[in-house]
């Protein structure tokens, strides 16, 4: 307290207030002095950081008494960086007081500083008091590790470089203190005032027209500047014309800022020569510029000039804070090779080529509200391997071509950044090039938000790409974009697009209100979607064409015109657990050769179709899918397409559950349910083919299954058509149906039917039961054949052939327990039954009614029916051979009306309730061979009947028929025929009597 404090020591004391910490270093030997250079780097052995001072040491050194310090003491031989007296400064065997270089009392906690004494002249300002007010870049929180440009953490290096000024200041003061520990009682004053220490301290100077240094270039090139480690340059307001760039070409820390009291934006560095305004080109240089404007302005509008660079960094680091940079023909900020640039709160606009460019390994960071706008081509450009740019909390808007361009292996990371109203928001081009977006808004760009091509990659997290022409475009083999939690909406054409081999992977993203949500086009192009929503798009949610591929899991494609489309040969879409519902037309659609594979998907409430496939080679495969409540059809295949569905449900569609139409079109159904649809459960028309296995078609309003038109064919295996509104299964207008082991039950009217000429139904081992009217029917020319089938419990007729040229052929079938008739032909219908059982029907077993109708029965049983075994009337014809007509409640055979006739060969009509045979109103019964008849339950009599061309029996010859008992008994007629001795008929005569070759193969010559 009794001695003057040297100015440099005063600055060292005040440095403690700046750095906010006590630093203790250990000097290993005097070799440190020789190895320490003026900049405090080369040849330096890194000093060791030691424990903080004790509270007593802090007080003795003039530190704040409130500072928290460790109770541990520094060991002998260690020195404190910021002066003062403590036991750690003692040398062995010497009292502590002898170590005080100026005799300071240990009890003094404050030192009265005298007015500063100038130490440097020659235009530089004195050192005294400088270090206490120097402003160094503050240490910043480290950048997220995940945002580093590469595995080496290049962006982290930027932060580390800018923070190293503190470490340099600490080292230089520690060096002085360490030397004092070795040099004796007055060595501290001598060391601190030496040129060595002065060369590593801070220098401050001012640039202005009336100052010693009139230009920034002169100030930076001065001797004072070159020997100082920390340099501060204040620039006075005004426009400073520069013909030659200012340079920092050695290892220094430089701060350039407006002079105190200057208005914001009042300091402008300008040039019209095309030379850079400021250049940094030294590996250890660190330059900070605050609040300055750099402006190139040519005399007239010039073409792009890449050599025109306002700021140019090739080595070292530069920090730009709140600066404005403009170059009307070239580059605002250019960082090359080993250079690093960080821009904070800057405006980098109106450049002729690019606002910020990094190339040849240069690295740039743009953060804290930077605006990069109206540049002619690029807002930011990163090119060449090793180059990288970090953009955070900034805006890149209204640039002429690209907001950000990345190429030739460079990398760009953007966080919380807006890229708006550029031609293209971001483009990444070339193998190794990469873009990372996190919480960015890439919107309202004229062409596309993000473009990736020629092997480049990109990933985006929680970002938006909105109101562009295209949200995202990826093209060429090797190009890949990964999206997580992104929104791509309101883009004019598509939200996400891959072409020419590009690939996209998206997780939990939304593609809304675009023309098309997702597009994959061209061979090798691939889109993989997981938990995404491609909804509310003007045309298509997911559209894949011309060889593109898409895979979607757990996604929604709703409220589009089409949910999913696969167009053209080679296009492939795979869907799993997806929802393509509520679309204006179709849920999923395949056309022109596209292929769709869907598993566990929901395709509901679409205004037209749940699933549609068109054209040859188009194919849809469905597994455990649901297509319900669609405006027209659940599933439709047309014009040559094919659809395969397994374990699917198609319910409550307005028209069809399944519809196949057109030659070559095919549908295969297995274990499916088609229920409660407005028209048919399954329909085929115009040559379409359906193969149905183990399926159920139930409660459809008109029919379970319908095959319509020539060439249309439906095959049913182990399936069921039940409870449908009118018909279980029908072939109409030339269609055909074949069924095996199927059941048609509880349909409102008909179980199975064949309508119209050319229509054909073939049944094997099927059952048609408990239908409202008819089990099996052929009408208006339809054909139906059945083998080993059961027809029972139907409300009126088991089996009927009705109208001209309709035909039914039955082999080994059973028609029983039907409400009125077992089998019948009427209206010129034809019916053939071989080895059939027609029993227990409530009225008649077999009926032939109307002129032209014909029934032929062979080796069958027409027993136990409610009234007649065989009933023929109104011109019908029946031929029965080798059959039983027994135990019917009224008669075995009953014939009405003129022109009605029955021919019997070797039949058994015994045991019927009233009479075996009965004829009336001019009808005729012909009996051939040995016919067993009897009129009551007791008599059994075999009456031989000769093979005559025919026997006319009067209408009053049938006793007990309809209450008439005054006719001649049939037994008497048989006796009369036997007396004639007629011979057995020849084979040709028998075939002619049967007509049309019926059962030709069954007749014995």
Image: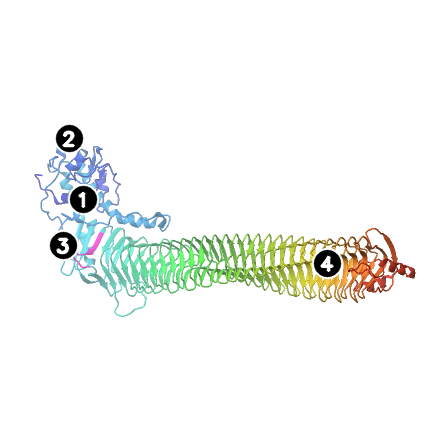
Q: Is 869 colored magenta in this rendering? A: no
Relative placement, left or right, of 196 versus 536 is: left
Mark 1 or 4: the one toward you = 4
**CB under 8 Å between discs 3 and 1:** no
Reading the image, the residue beneath label 1 is 17
Report which residue position mark 3 lands on.
123
> Under tag 2, what secondary structure?
loop
- Give the label, 2 or 4, closer to the camera: 4
Q: Quadrant of the C terminus?
A: bottom right
Categorize mark 1 by other alpha carbons within 10 Å: few (<14), some (14-19), many (20+): some
Magenta segment: 254-263
Residue 619, x across and y down, in percent: 57, 59
Numbered mark located on residue 823 in the image: 4
Q: Disc 3 or disc 4, which is closer to the eye?
A: 4
Distance from label 3 to label 1 (Cα)?
28 Å
Circle nearer the N terminus (3, 1): 1
Seen from the viewer's position, the closer of residues 631 and 462 is 631
Q: Which quarter of the figure is the N terminus placed in?
A: top left
Residue 409, percent from left and from top:
39, 55
Looking at marks 2 and 4 on the same chain, the residue that comes earlier in the sequence is marked by 2
Mark 4: few/some/many CA within 10 Å (<14, 14-19, 20+): many
Q: Are marks 2 and 4 in contact (CB under 8 Å)?
A: no
How far apart are labels 3 and 4 at the CA level? Answer: 127 Å
């Amino acid at each position: 307290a009794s001695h003057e404090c040297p100015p440099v020591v005063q600055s060292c004391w005040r440095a403690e207030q700046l750095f906010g910490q006590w630093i203790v270093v250990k000097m290993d030997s005097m070799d440190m002095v020789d190895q320490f250079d003026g900049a405090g780097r080369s040849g330096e052995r890194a000093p060791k950081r030691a424990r903080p001072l004790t509270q007593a040491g802090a007080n003795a050194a003039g530190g704040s008494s409130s500072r928290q310090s460790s109770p541990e003491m520094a060991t002998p031989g260690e020195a404190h960086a910021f002066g003062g007296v403590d036991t750690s400064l003692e040398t062995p065997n010497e009292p502590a007081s002898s170590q005080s270089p100026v005799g300071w009392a240990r009890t003094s906690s404050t030192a009265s500083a005298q007015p500063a004494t100038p130490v440097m002249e020659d235009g530089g300002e004195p050192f005294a008091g400088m270090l206490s007010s120097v402003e160094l870049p503050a240490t910043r929180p480290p950048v997220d590790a995940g945002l580093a440009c590469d595995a080496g953490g290049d962006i982290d290096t930027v932060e580390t470089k800018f923070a190293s000024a503190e470490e340099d200041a600490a080292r230089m003061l520690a060096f002085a203190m360490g030397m004092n520990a070795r040099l004796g009682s007055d060595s501290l004053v001598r060391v601190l005032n030496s040129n060595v220490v002065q060369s590593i301290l801070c220098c401050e100077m001012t640039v202005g027209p009336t100052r010693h240094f009139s230009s920034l270039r002169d100030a930076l090139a001065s001797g004072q500047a070159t020997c100082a480690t920390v340099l501060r340059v204040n620039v006075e307001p005004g426009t400073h014309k520069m013909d030659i760039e200012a340079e920092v070409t050695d290892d220094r820390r430089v701060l350039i800022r407006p002079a105190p009291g200057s208005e914001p934006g009042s300091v402008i560095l300008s040039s019209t020569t095309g030379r850079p305004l400021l250049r940094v080109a030294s590996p250890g240089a660190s330059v900070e510029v605050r609040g300055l404007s750099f402006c190139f302005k040519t005399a007239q509008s010039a073409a792009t000039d890449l050599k025109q660079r306002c700021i140019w960094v090739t080595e070292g680091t530069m920090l730009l804070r709140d600066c404005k940079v403009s170059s009307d023909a070239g580059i605002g900020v250019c960082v090359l090779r080993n250079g690093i640039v960080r821009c904070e709160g800057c405006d980098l606009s109106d450049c002729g080529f690019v606002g910020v460019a990094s190339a040849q390994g240069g690295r740039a960071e743009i953060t804290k509200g930077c605006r990069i706008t109206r540049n002619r081509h690029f807002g930011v450009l990163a090119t060449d391997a090793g180059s990288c740019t970090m953009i955070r909390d900034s805006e890149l808007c209204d640039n002429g071509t690209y907001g950000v361009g990345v190429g030739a292996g460079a990398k760009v990371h953007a966080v919380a950044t807006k890229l708006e109203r550029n031609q293209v928001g971001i483009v990444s081009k070339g193998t190794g090039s990469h873009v990372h977006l996190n919480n960015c808004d890439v919107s309202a760009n004229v062409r596309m938000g993000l473009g990736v091509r020629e092997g480049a990659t990109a990933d985006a997290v929680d970002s938006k790409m909105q109101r562009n022409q295209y949200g995202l475009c990826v093209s060429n083999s090797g190009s890949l974009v990964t999206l997580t939690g992104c929104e791509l909406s309101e883009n004019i054409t598509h939200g996400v697009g891959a072409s020419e081999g590009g690939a996209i992977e998206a997780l939990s993203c939304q593609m809304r209100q675009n023309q098309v949500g997702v597009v994959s086009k061209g061979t090798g192009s691939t889109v993989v979607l997981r938990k995404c929503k491609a909804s509310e798009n003007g045309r298509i949610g997911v559209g894949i064409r011309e060889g593109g591929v898409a895979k979607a899991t757990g996604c929604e494609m709703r409220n589009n015109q089409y949910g999913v489309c696969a167009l053209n040969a080679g296009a492939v879409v795979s869907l799993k657990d997806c929802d393509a519902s509520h679309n204006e037309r179709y849920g999923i659609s395949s056309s022109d050769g596209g292929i769709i594979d869907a598993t566990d998907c929901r395709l509901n409430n679409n205004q037209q179709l749940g699933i549609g496939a068109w054209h040859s080679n188009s194919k849809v495969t469905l597994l455990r899918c649901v297509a319900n409540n669609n405006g027209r059809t659940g599933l439709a295949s047309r014009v040559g397409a094919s659809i395969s569905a397994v374990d699917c449900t198609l319910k409550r569609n307005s028209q069809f559950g399944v519809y196949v139409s057109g030659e070559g079109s095919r549908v295969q159904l297995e274990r499916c349910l088609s229920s409660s649809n407005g028209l048919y459960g399954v329909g085929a028309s115009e040559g379409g083919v359906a193969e149905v296995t183990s399926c159920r078609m139930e409660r459809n309003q008109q029919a379970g299954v319908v095959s319509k038109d020539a060439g249309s064919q439906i095959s049913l295996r182990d399936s069921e058509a039940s409870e449908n509104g009118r018909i279980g299964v029908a072939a109409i207008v030339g269609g055909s149906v074949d069924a095996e082991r199927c059941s048609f039950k509880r349909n409102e009217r008909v179980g199975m039917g064949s309508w119209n000429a050319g229509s054909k139904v073939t049944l094997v081992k099927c059952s048609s039961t408990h239908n409202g009217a008819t089990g099996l029917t052929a009408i208006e020319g339809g054909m139906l054949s059945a083998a080993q089938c059961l027809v029972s419990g139907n409300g009126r007729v088991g089996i009927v052939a009705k109208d001209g040229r309709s035909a039914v052929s039955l082999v080994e079938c059973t028609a029983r327990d039907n409400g009125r008739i077992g089998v019948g032909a009427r209206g010129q219908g034809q019916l053939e039954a071989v080895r059939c059982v027609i029993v227990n029907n409530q009225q008649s077993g077999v009926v032939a009614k109307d002129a032209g109708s014909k029934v032929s029965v062979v080796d069958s049983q027409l027993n136990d029916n409610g009234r007649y075994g065989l009933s023929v009337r109104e011109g019908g014809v029946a031929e029965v051979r080798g059959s039983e007509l027994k135990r019917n409640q009224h008669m075995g055979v009953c014939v009405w009306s003129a022109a009605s006739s029955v021919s019997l060969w070797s039949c058994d009509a015994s045991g019927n309730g009233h009479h075996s045979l009965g004829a009336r109103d001019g009808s005729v019964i012909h009996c051939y061979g040995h016919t067993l008849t009897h009129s009551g339950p007791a008599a059994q009599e075999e009456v031989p009947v000769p093979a005559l061309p025919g026997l006319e029996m009067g209408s009053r010859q049938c006793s007990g028929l309809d209450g008439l008992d005054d006719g001649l008994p049939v037994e008497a007629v048989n006796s009369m025929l036997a007396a004639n001795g007629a011979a057995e008929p020849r084979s040709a005569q028998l075939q002619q009597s049967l007509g049309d070759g019926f059962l030709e193969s069954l007749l014995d010559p």
